[in-house]
Amino acid sequence: MKHVSIEKSVYLDSVSLMRLSKKVGEAPGVKSAMVAMATDTNLLLLRDGGFDVAGLGAASANDLVIAIDAQDAAALEAALSLVRNEVTGSAKPHGDGESGTYVARGLESALKQYPEINLVLISVPGRFAAYEAEKALRAGRHVMIFSDNVSLEDEQRLKQIGRDQGLLVMGPDCGTAIIAGAGLGFANSVPRGRIGLVAASGTGAQEVSSILARSGLGISQIIGTGGRDVSDTIGGVMTKMGLGALIRDAATDVIVIVSKLPSDRVAREILEIASGGGKPCIVYFAGYAGEKHRGGLVFTGTLADTAVEAALAATGQVISPVPDDRRLPERLRDLRVKLPASRRFVRGLYSGGTLAQEAVFMLGGALAPIHTNMKLPGTVRLEDAAVSIGHTIVDLGDDVFTRGRAHPMIDQAYRLARLEREAADPETAVILLDVVLGYGCNADPAGELAEKIEKIGTHPIFVASICGTQGDPQNYGLQRQKLEGAGVLVAETNAHACELAGAILDSQR
């Protein structure tokens, strides 16, 4: 028994929606459930799941859609009652006096209760985030804006305020930061150390810091900026401020710059500061293919190589993120033999934007053309990001997928549905996945993927990398076991996964 309805002008944040969907989905007699904002993407997902969304009328992204598939009328009514109670309860102010935790009603009351706070993390709907961030800046606090869907104009204005007042504005859409040992957003469990990162890339920072951590090396700071910071419009304002902060930081000996592809002008300005900073500096600009050494800086082509060079600069020792597996060529041939000749395309379903970019740049030369929803040179832009064409790599964390929905590093519902569709395509040879661990991320991403993959079967071939550490709440080793148990070929790094995907397709030729 399927039910779908709309609650007009009811908003819940993406994490609350994910938790509520999970809670309702686990209720007695419920086969599946989705409580989400009524965005076009979410309605499309419901339609593909067999729900009748045609009768919803003029639903908008400001409305709540409730979709439940229950065994009978009693189970459906109980599930709907659960949703109503949760939605009503979420609108009520709350506190926790017994535990000693102060739950503020707003920024002003929080700063009044804790005047020593010097950094404010903003995680509210995008249309409210700029307003709250400006209030924090006007109050003299640094800001990390975890929220996405903030306009470019608002970002430019906020960062001008921050620059004028000497305050960091990390974000919008800043997924990761570690400041003085405190992890913010999707941070991993990494030891303290002498390597500092300034990152216009959340998952890029996670990948580098996790590889270093798995090699026994630590991080002093990760200063996130948000990916748009290195655009011409924003001008790299916070990347340059963060770089200056690391140059002055006594706890940082080696600096790493990790960034989505910057504009030429912004890149020159960043590199000028880095080359004059007096500290070893490793630079990863996604897609850079120039000389390795320039102006005292070391340039790298992959995130894994970035970690290797940072370790070398910090310790003088060479780390090896990818172990020598002499049986690997044989295993790849065996996998390829099992595939029908019609399966000839790679489909990358990424939750991390910079990991997706790295995949495009690594595979684009051999597998051109690559179709993608990202604006990258040498690629073909997908008109409809929900539909794959030929070789396709998509960033599922892009705004088009996250309006009214939790980021795929939190809620994999859309990625799991997309994975099933891609596997059913008779032309899909390899599905390439990233599994991102850390605080705030999905509690068991590998387990969810493994369950779906086991139901799909042996075709196509699944290749995944895990970005995380043994100390993460999800546990790197346990996540790896779950993927391997489902027949997934697990790589040590995203770059390694791309190499494996390319090798599988090469063996077809």
Image (tube, rainbow, N blue to C red):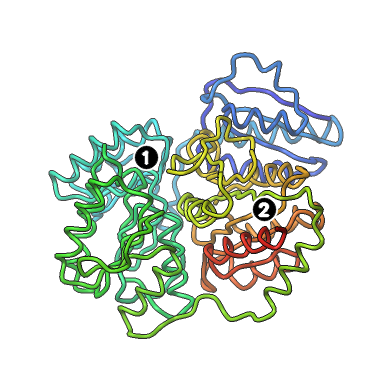
The vertical placement of 119 against 293, above or below, is above
The vertical placement of 498 against 80, above or below, is below
Residue farthest to the right? 72
Residue 111 is at least partly visible in this image: no
Image-based side of 499 in relation to 304, left or right: right
Percent position (x, y) of residue 112? 24, 46
Name which residue lies at 41% across and 42% down: 147
Percent position (x, y) of residue 218? 37, 75
Number of numbered discs on residues: 2
Element type where label 2 sits in the image:
strand
Q: Which mark is residue 431?
A: 2
Which amino acid type corresponds to the residue marked 1 in the rendered image? Arg
Q: Classify 10 Å Cα crowding around label 2: few (below 14), some (14-19), many (20 and above).
A: many
Specify which label sits upstream in the sequence, 2 or 1. Answer: 1
**Residue 484 or 432: which is nearer the viewer?**
432
**Label 2 close to label 1 by CB (< 8 Å):** no
Name which residue lies at 73% across and 41% down: 421
Image-based side of 372 in relation to 290, left or right: right
The vertical placement of 279 against 376, above or below, is below
Q: CA distance from mark 2 to mark 1?
A: 45 Å
**Residue 57 or 509: which is nearer the viewer?**
509
Percent position (x, y) of residue 335? 76, 65
Element type where label 1 sits in the image:
loop
Name which residue lies at 72% across and 28% down: 47
Q: Which mark is residue 105?
A: 1
Name which residue lies at 64% across and 48% down: 347
